[in-house]
Image (cartoon, helix red, strand yellow):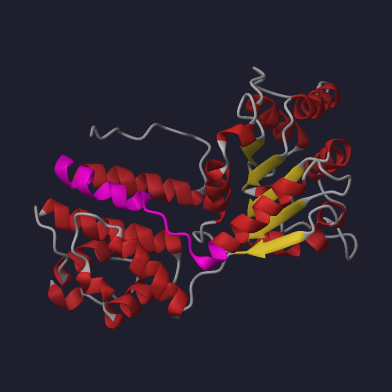
Amino acid sequence: MRVVEPAVDTDLTDYEIEDRQALERRYKTYSVEALKAALPVDDIFVAHAQFMRAVNAVNRVYELARETSMPQGMYLEGPVGTGKSSVFRYFKTSLPRKSLFGDQLGVLTVRAKKNATAAQLVGAVLRCYGYPIRRVGSDTLEPRVNITKEAIRQKKTRLIGIDEASNLLHSPNRRLTSAKDDGTSATDYLCEVIDETCIGVVLIGSERLAHLEQTDPALASRLTTHERLENFSYDDEWVKFASAFLRQCVGFDLRLFLSNAGLKTLHRVAEGNVRTFKRFVTECCLCVANESTQTLQESHAAQAFRAVFGGGSGLQCPYAHAL
């Protein structure tokens, strides 16, 4: 396995920047052998109950899209790091290849940039279809909107997932002129596409989407399903999820975490957040592998805690006594 340095991308979210910074730090801190052994841990996936509930909701939209004149859509919201984007990726990769049609265009995924406009969204959709368009201007917007609608029909696209979809809405600091808002150019475009092509739409974003009925009632009326991913409480679902994940960490003995006390401490460290949990466990495995051993000790957990959260975070490390 060859370790490849991450490529530069200027269109990253804040948490993706954090992930990239963590990866760059790991390349500088750990041996190549440790990286090869431990980084696969970050790719482990556990299909827990609330995750699969959201996946099934996406599948329902997919199955009904273009089969009826009634709009089909949903919005999936929740705190950062709960696995919302992974829901759509999991759904898309789980589809039989024939379900994606000839050019793998049965399901599209785009990302909304900050303060997204209709022109930016139209450009993103056109690039999914292979149109070599770098920019859509106001003078070319209408004909290119029509091109997207025709492409959806011709390629038999059934579903489009829009990540970071909170960026489609008005800024939360914008003063409303009435109790209900009137949407944006980007959401107006979505409403038009839904009405004229019957494509299913899944919005994925922050907790701002929870207020879609107030911020954009026109779009909300077309996306009737609302799903939410939460951080885990410390309960049986957390125990099942964390235990299943830890047991998939092949090549590492993580019994320190698998006791009742260990799982409870892990929950406190991660605050029930999936991304934080994965980041911390991956770092623990890197610390273990860097010492050419397999068994996790509290000293490794303490090193990983400092690496992930930093000395100035103000968080109390539950493993600090081992250093």
Q: Is residue 96 left or right of residue 156?
A: left
Q: Is residue 136 left or right of residue 214?
A: left
Q: Position of residue 137 (x, y in %)?
A: 76, 24
Residue at image point 62% right, 48% down:
164
Residue placed most toward the observer, 292 or 98: 98
| Predominant SS of the magenta segment | helix
Q: Is residue 230 left or right of residue 75?
A: left
Is residue 115 in sight in this rendering? yes
Q: Is residue 239 left or right of residue 200?
A: left
Residue placed most toward the observer, 302 or 52: 52
Residue at image point 84% right, 22% down:
143
Q: Position of residue 117 (x, y in %)?
A: 74, 38
In the picture, residue 110 is in which quadrant?
top right
Number of dots carrying numbers: 0
Q: Farthest left residue?
A: 292
Residue at image point 19% right, 54% down:
251
Q: Position of residue 246 (x, y in %)?
A: 30, 64
In the picture, residue 152 is in which quadrant?
top right
Residue 179 magenta-highlighted: no
**Segment tinted magenta in the rendering:** 32-51
